[in-house]
Amino acid sequence: MFYMNGQFVEDLEAKISILDLGLVRGYGVFDYLRTYRGLPFHLKEHLLRLKYSGEYLGIHLPHSLEEIEKIIKRLLDQNGYLESSIKIILTGGVSPDQITPQETASLIILIYPLASLPKEDYHLGIITMTTPLQRSLPTAKTLHYAPAIMALQQGRYKNAKEILYLNANHEILEASTSNFFGFTKKGVLLTCDSEEILLGITREIIIKLAKEHFPVELRAVNYAELNEIEESFITSSNKEILPVVQIDDQLIGSGKIGPFTQKLMHLFYLYTSEGNWPDLNISRYKII
C-alpha cells in the first residue's frame, strides 16, 4: 500500500503523470528512513529535512508535517511489515509545458520491506572509489542522482560498493548515499561539515555518540592524508555504520575493521535499541 496525492493505492495502481516535473526534469526532493521494531527512526528529523529540501528548491509540501506523520503511521499499520523502509517523494507536480511548476506539488509515500546489506560487509568492510563528479545542490536531498549512478557503475569494475565525492581541493566530502568518517592515527574522528554535503540524520547521531568517547573534528579528510587515516566508515539510514577498508588503491590502516569503528557500531546498536530517541535539533533543517 502506497500514498499518492491524497489516495492510498495498491502497488500496481500507483501511477504518476508523464508530465510530472519529477519525471521530466528531475525537479523534486525525497527523504528516506527505516523502522526499528516497527517505529520510524527519527521521523521528525527526516520530515524537517524533507521540508527544508523542498523549500530550498521552491517546492512546498501540500500537507503539514503532522499530517504526513499520520499518513506514514497509517501506511505502516496497513502494510504490517516486520521492519520497513519509508521513502517520501516531493516533486514539482504536473506541468503542462514540462518546465513551469504549478501550484500543487506531488507527494508520494512508499512503504516497503526493509532490505539488509550483506553481513560480510559489516564483518570485512567494503572497498570505495573516489570520483571528481559533483552532486548538484548538495545541501538538499534532490532526485538528481545521475553523477552517483554513473560513478557507482564505474566503481563496480573495481569491486567498489560505494563512491566518494572529491571537491576541487581533493577533500573527501561524502558518499553517494552516505556520509564519510575517518579516524586519524591519534584517534581523532573527522567528518566533513561544509555546505558541500547533505547532513545525514545518522551522521548527526554518530557525532553525538562519538563526542562522549573520542575527540571529534568537523573537517573534511584530504585525499593526501589518507595514509594518516587508521579507520574509516560511512553512515546512512539503511547502511547504519558501514566500515570502509580501502579507498581506491589505498588500504585504510591494516585493511581491517578497527576497534574505534567497532565501538561506534556497538554504541549505535544500543542507541537504536532504546526506542525513545531525543530530538537532534539539526540547525540546518529548522523549519524555514
Image (cartoon, rainbow, N blue to C red):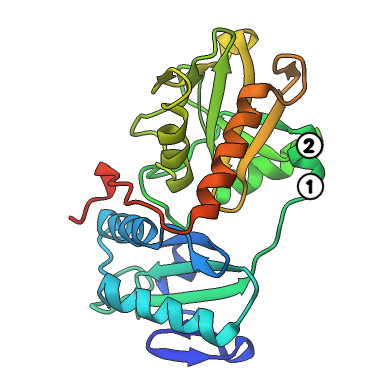
Rendered location of residue 286, percent (x, y): 23, 51
Q: Nearer the viewer, residue 80 or 170?
A: 80
Identified at 32% across, 51% down, the residue is: 279
- From this view, report whether residue 216 is shown above or below residue 7: above
- From this view, report whether residue 79 is shown above or below residue 178: below
Residue 176 visible in the current orientation = no
Residue 89 visible in the current orientation = yes
Local secondary structure at mark 1: helix
The residue singled out by tag 2 in the image is 123
Circle count: 2
Which amino acid does the dot numbered 2 rest on? Answer: His
Circles 2 and 1, Cβ within 8 Å, touching? The answer is yes
Q: Residues within 10 Å of mark 1 (few under 14, many from 20)?
A: few
**Cα–Cα gap, marks 2 and 1:** 7 Å
Which amino acid does the dot numbered 1 rest on? Answer: Lys
Q: Residues within 10 Å of mark 2 (few under 14, many from 20)?
A: few
- From this view, report whether residue 28 is shown above or below residue 240: below
125 on left or right of 62: right
Local secondary structure at mark 2: helix
Q: Nearer the viewer, residue 133 or 39?
A: 39
Rendered location of residue 185, percent (x, y): 59, 8
Identified at 54% across, 87% down, the residue is: 78
Q: In the rendered view of the protein, which quadrant contains the C terminus? A: bottom left
Rendered location of residue 261, percent (x, y): 62, 28
Identified at 56% across, 45% down, the residue is: 270
Q: In the rendered view of the protein, which quadrant contains the N terminus? A: bottom right
- From this view, report whether residue 113 is shown above or below residue 30: below
Rendered location of residue 280, percent (x, y): 33, 47
Image quarter for residue 187?
top right
The residue singled out by tag 1 in the image is 119
Q: Nearer the viewer, residue 215 or 198?
A: 215
76 on left or right of 194: right
